[in-house]
Image (cartoon, rainbow, N blue to C red):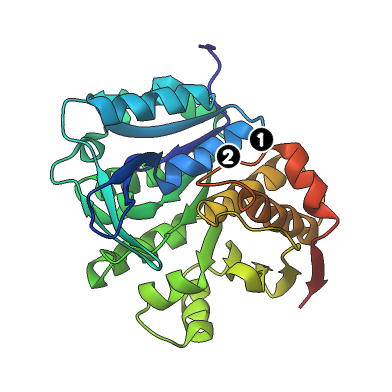
Amino acid sequence: MSAEFPVFVAAGEALTDLIVQDPQHQRWQALVGGSTWNVARVMARLGLPSAFAGAISQDVFGDALWRASGEAGLDLRFLQRVKRSPLLAIVHETRPPQYFFVGDDSADLHFDAALLPAGWMAQAGWVHFGGISLARQPLSNKLLELAEDLKRAGVRISYDPNYRALMDEAYDATLKRMTALADVVKVSDEDLQGLFRTDDIAAAFDKLRALNPAATYLYTRGAAGASLHVGTASWQARVPPVEVVDTVGAGDASIASLLYSLSQRANLPPAEHLRFAVAGGAAACLGAGASPPGIELIEGLLAQVTVRAG
């Protein structure tokens, strides 16, 4: 492992998805996952030195996450192993997805930022937060404190709430706090509807932006495309025509691709950053499961993404 530290870190949850395979709920498939962990994998796949900062169990589920993290090229110095139970997402229906989480006092909750390698913040360009990790105590408070420390250190922060049912009224304070800290916020229609408990999606987006008008916002709408909002300016993009295999991980790939573009293609205008983000999300749909797309695949789709101002 290199003595150099990663330029990108995602902090949050890595978990195991247990997905039902038959109508009688007798057969299940276990897959490694977690929204923030997926974002770190995409960044590593795009070639940036990356890490996932979180805690996993010491059992077979944790072993699978450890192996997958190493295979993805993530810096394993940031991944902590704790003698606690694993965090599981039980996907008991797939069309549409219905699930619940099993993780009382599980390993993820015992993440300790003080155990991360000394001096790592000095080399971090971006640190990403989001997912259910920010809705589970005491992990949420630990991550919020880490985000505030990073902000004071001048590290740029991205945030994708990635709404889940456990993000009820108690999550409102976290939403406000993280949005205020973030340089980039990624949000979807489903996020806005769930987080603000309303069907008026446009009003919900306005409320979110009012929490931090200086932030850049990536607003994704699935097959309807996405938009990028910077101050009073905005750009709209249509998704390229692709044969969708699976949409799992598309949102994670889109925010990772945006952050990659902002850091590695900083001289380009916002419309091009949006184009890259949409191409990244579309590229993730070409493979089954949360399949991190490579740079060549994304670049091959760029010309098919149409972007307009306003």
Residue type marked 1? Leu
The correct choice, above or below, for 257 with respect to 2 in the image is below
Residue type marked 2? Val
- Determine the residue positioned at 83% across, 59% down: 304
Please, what secondary structure does the residue beneath circle 1 have? loop
Tell me if 258 is positioned left or right of 206 in this view: right
Q: Quadrant of residue 247?
A: bottom right
Q: Residues within 10 Å of mark 2 (few under 14, many from 20)?
A: many
The disc placed on residue 94 is none
The disc placed on residue 46 is 1
Tell me if 7 is positioned left or right of 264 in this view: left
Residue 226: x, y in percent? Answer: 65, 68
Please, what secondary structure does the residue beneath circle 2 have? helix
- Determine the residue positioned at 53% across, 60% down: 185
Residue 119 visible somewhere in the drawing? no
Q: Of 188 and 117, which appears nearest the observer?
A: 188
- Determine the residue positioned at 60% across, 54% down: 245
Residue 80: x, y in percent? Answer: 31, 25
Q: Which residue is denoted by mark 2 in the rendering?
A: 42
Q: Of 306 and 179, which appears nearest the observer?
A: 306
The correct choice, above or below, for 287 with respect to 9 in the image is below
CA separation, marks 1 and 2? 6 Å
The reply to whether the C-beta atoms of the residues labelled 1 and 2 are less than 8 Å apart is yes
Q: Residues within 10 Å of mark 1 (few under 14, many from 20)?
A: some
